[in-house]
Image (spheres, coloured by chain):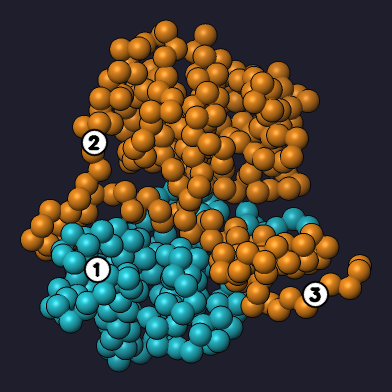
Chain colours: A orange, B cyan
Amino acid sequence: MSKSPIIKDEELHAYVDGRLSPQRNAEVKAYLAANPEAAEKVRVYQQQNQMMHTLFDRVLHEPLPAKLENMLPAPVPRRSYRAVAMIALSLMTGGMSGYLLRGEVTHTIMVAEPFTGRAAVAHAVYAAEILHPVEVGAENEAHLVQWLSKRLGHQLRTPDFTSFGYQLVGGRLLPGDKGAAAQFMYQTGDGARLTLYVSVKDSGMEQTAFRVQEENGQQVLYWVDDNLGFALVGEKGRNQMLDMARVAYQAMSF
Amino acid sequence: MNYHTLAEHIPSLRRYAIALLHDRNRADDLVQDTLERAMKKFSLFVTNSDLRAWLFTIMHNIFINQISRRREVMDTGDTAVQDPSAYNMAEELIVARDFIIALQQLTDEQRSIILLIGLEQLSYEETARVLKLPVGTVMSRLARARERLHALLNGEAGPQLRRVK
């Protein structure tokens, strides 16, 4: 190891919390590249922060309990659900033509769907996993698809995301709300990961067109068809995620 | 400066309170008490800039008072870990549950520090003001809290979070 600048432990935390000057930030970044032990610490702390967001951010989008809402003389500003409903409606009527909302998505759409929460948690947990991201790897794709289809009781397919630079890594079986759920994982050449979570539709899930939810920089794109709920989770921009959701939707539906 | 401004902060006050207390009813009570006190003192507060930190300070003071009152009554010393299944969020995933349990096993102060900085993204200076600690103390306790959380997740918690090296 070449002589490295002295980076105090405190600065690793400040790095994780984004509290360093741009210059110092770059220095710490370079230091981490040469010091796996420090890099591991940073990864652990980052994962802690991410986990807290994954678990608790949804509270931000819940309607307030009446006792809090009634406290303030002025009404609490709310998101425009009307606009959201309009978009959803236009999507429904767009039907099978494959029309999808694109750049015009300006609202972050928040709907309390527990399965998207599970998808986000499963993504946070397994996308960060280095050694065992999947149970069955892409080399056994046919077996993977057959196995998960059987466990979910519906024919699944693995969407082809190669045009977006993503290759299938594999998949795993997860607990869903009422039964089994499946997670397919994809990865780019530089290691960015994306997961597609599929859960059997239960009574609490309503059929929807594509919806977008954002949690801690993670885009969760989800939709529910006759039998299954799907959630695509990744860190890419919303437009690309929408394009990928369309590909997934088509792969799963036809 | 009006009540709208105050209202904007309610969701993040709730997020923090729920993560801190792990009990939605108590969390909403805490938010309610915080808002009541904030509205009473509202006129005293002139600048908009650190309204958020000010609200967290009020909440922290109420929280601390409640804790000490509870301690007097119960005198158990240890923070009780509640049944995580009462928390209706991603409960199927053991990892999430382990994390919530580990978070509850931190001391109140460690949990406050980790949540204010990692979740609510308050600066170290703001956190120091909220908790009435020197900034250096906040930073060293943050480091200790994160290491402890890590240790809890690796050792005493379930196997799912044990990292494979």
Asked whether the viewer can see residue A25, the reply is yes
Mark 2, other Cα within 10 Å: few <14 / some 14–19 / many ≥20: few
Task: Determine whether label 3 and label 1 are within 8 Å by CB.
Answer: no
Q: Chain of mark 3?
A: A
Query: What residue appears at the point 55 percent right and 86 percent down from the top-left corner?
Result: B136
Query: What residue appears at the point 61 percent right and 69 percent down from the top-left corner?
Result: A21
Residue type beneath disc 2: Tyr
Instruction: Write down the residue under mark 2.
Output: A81
Mark 1, other Cα within 10 Å: few <14 / some 14–19 / many ≥20: many
Q: Which residue is most to the right?
A: A1
Q: Position of residue B127 (x, y in %)?
A: 43, 78
Tag 2, which secondary structure?
helix
Q: Nearer the viewer, mark 1 or mark 2?
A: 2
Q: Chain of mark 1?
A: B
- The correct choice, above or below, for A55 with respect to A186 in the image is below
Q: CA distance from mark 3 to mark 1?
A: 45 Å
Q: Quadrant of residue B22?
A: bottom left
Taking the image as shown, residue A16 lies to the left or right of residue A2, namely: left
Q: Nearer the viewer, mark 3 or mark 2?
A: 3
Numbered circle sitting on residue A5: 3
Q: Quadrant of residue A48?
A: bottom right
Numbered circle sitting on residue A140: none
Q: Earlier in the sequence, mark 3 or mark 2?
A: 3
Residue type beneath disc 3: Pro
Q: Position of residue B79 (x, y in %)?
A: 42, 78
Q: Chain of mark 2?
A: A
Q: Nearer the viewer, mark 3 or mark 1?
A: 3
Q: Where the N terminus of chain A falls, by quadrant?
A: bottom right
Instruction: Write down the residue under mark 1.
Output: B31
